[in-house]
Structures are given as C-alpha cells and as structure tokens.
Amino acid sequence: MLAIIGGSGLYDLNSLGSQGHNSLRQESVRTEYAATAVTIDLLETEAGTVAFLPRHGKTHHLPPHKINYRANIAALKKLGANEILAINAVGGINASAGPGSLIVPDQLIDYTWGRASTFFEDNLDRVVHVDFGEPFTAGMRERVLKAVKQANEQSEDPRLLMERAVYACTQGPRLETAAEIVRLQRDGCDVVGMTGMPEAVLAREQGLDYAMLALSVNWAAGIVPGEITMAEIEAVMAEGMDFLRQVLKLFLRLDS
Ligand code: HPA
C-alpha cells in the first residue's frame, strides 16, 4: 500500500479519489512510540487503497521538532504501507529551486538534533546500522518525476522541476540565518526544509520505500534581499497545492 505524508499546506487527500468511489475512512493506530493513537486517512482509489497522514496534524499544530516521526512511520507500517511519498515545503537555495518550483531530491544532509531518530536503540540483540547511502528509493523517484512531467504537459502553468537535489534538514522551527544558508550552499545543499529527517531514515529502518516531492515556497534566507514572511509562503503554497494534487492524481495512475 502507498502512503502519502502531507507537509505544510496538504492536510487531506480530497479530490484524489476516483470518481464514484473516493470513500474515505479513518484508522486510529496505536504504537509503542506514542501515548495517543496516530490517525490515518484511508482513501479508496482506482490504484487501490492509499493511506494519508498529515505530519503536522490536521490543524497544523505540530512544529517540525515535535512531530513523533517514529509513531507515524510505525503506524503506517502497521497498517500495511510498503512505500511512502513525502510531500514537503522547502526554501530554495539553488537558483533552479525558486518559489513555485518542484524538487525531487536524491540526497540529503541532516542538520537536526535531539530528535528520536532510530528504531534501533533499546533491547537490541545486536547493534544495527542501516545502509543510507541513497536515502531516497530510485524507482519511486522515477515515478514521481514521470507524474510531475505529465502534470506539466497538461498544465497551462507548468512548473520548474529539479530532478535531483540535495535536501538540507534543519531543526527549526525558526528559519535559518543568511550565514547558515551560505554554509548549506557550501555543503552542496539545493533546498532546505525541517521535516525530511528523521522521517526518511525511519522509513528505511522499517524497510519502506520512500521518496520526496518538495514544493519550494520561498527563497532561503539571504538568497534574495528582505525578510521571509509567512504571508508570502502561504500564497505560494496555496497556489502550488492544486498543482501538487494533480501530480498525486497522476502518480496514483502509474504502475508501481
Ligand atoms: N527553511 C527551512 N524550512 C523551510 C523553508 C526555509 O526557508 N521554507 C519552507 N520550509
């Protein structure tokens, strides 16, 4: 089963169900990683059942460092997910990742700290080191790229697409300083967000395929002069989400 994890701006899968049977039900999944259950939407589509989980909560009340990534991934695994498509809002560092553009990262650098970032820490028979050299699943990335290209062909407002990129995951919730962005640039990062990690590695630890489709919602700090405002971010996000939903619709129609 495919699971979609929605980021900022994507809190439901409305409009994605196939006509006539876009019935939605909810499952509350308990895991050993949270006192409360994780609520997951299940949508029946022509491609089968799709799970949806908004990582910031339905009402966007969880900041990036407070998200219970382990509970989310464990719950999706328990429900039967075998692949996750993550949707993430990012700031653009690379000149090709300006607001409104889409990015399918192939690499990441983790700058977060203090997050519960592994399933393998307690009651182990042996220490576990997962391979993470390629953090995103190649086959899934190809399908995401195909869906974005199809959406572009059908749209009067095609989007710039970065087919490879290095995603920097910062701690947040504050945005970065201009000097931090210069450092990320020197490190080879193209886009910056706050929620890609530990989500991606936890999926790997559970044996789930994982790819990210990111929407740039602002230029990262210092890339262009002036403050980054939430109003600006929200406007780009609102505009981009319709396109993203179309990409998701096309993605569901592709053979996996
Ligand atoms: N920095 C970090 N995370 C983000 C940004 C940013 O500029 N924009 C959207 N998510």
Image: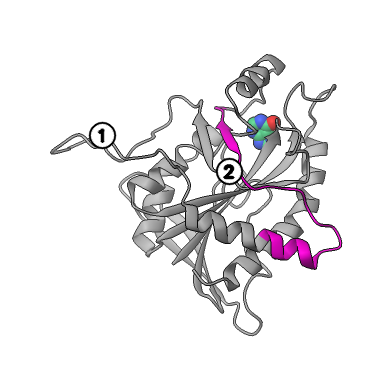
Mark 2 CB near ligand 1 (8 Å cut): no
Say left or right for 13 vs 159. Answer: left
Identify the residue shown where x is 63% and y is 78%: 18
Instruction: Name the residue tied to disc 1.
Output: 121
Whichever of callouts 2 and 1 sits on the residue coming sooner in the sequence is: 2
Front residue of 147/116: it is 147
Q: Amino acid at mark 2?
A: Pro
Q: CA distance from mark 2 to mark 1?
A: 28 Å
Splitting the image into four quadrants, where does ligand 1 fall?
top right
96 or 87, which is in the foreground? 96
Q: Is residue 20 visible?
A: yes
Which residue: 64% across, 25% down? Answer: 174
On the image, the x and y values in percent for residue 48 come to 50, 76
Left or right for 213, reference 113: right
Amino acid type, label 1 = Glu
Quarter of the image where one finds residue 143: bottom right
Residue marked by disc 2: 105
Residue at x 59%, y 82% (from the top left corner): 21
Tags 2 and 1 touching, CB below 8 Å: no
Q: Position of residue 192 (x, y in %)?
A: 63, 32
Give the x, y percent position of residue 235: 82, 45
- Highlighted magenta segment, given as a residue range: 148-171
Name the element at disc 2: loop
Residue 68, can we see it? no
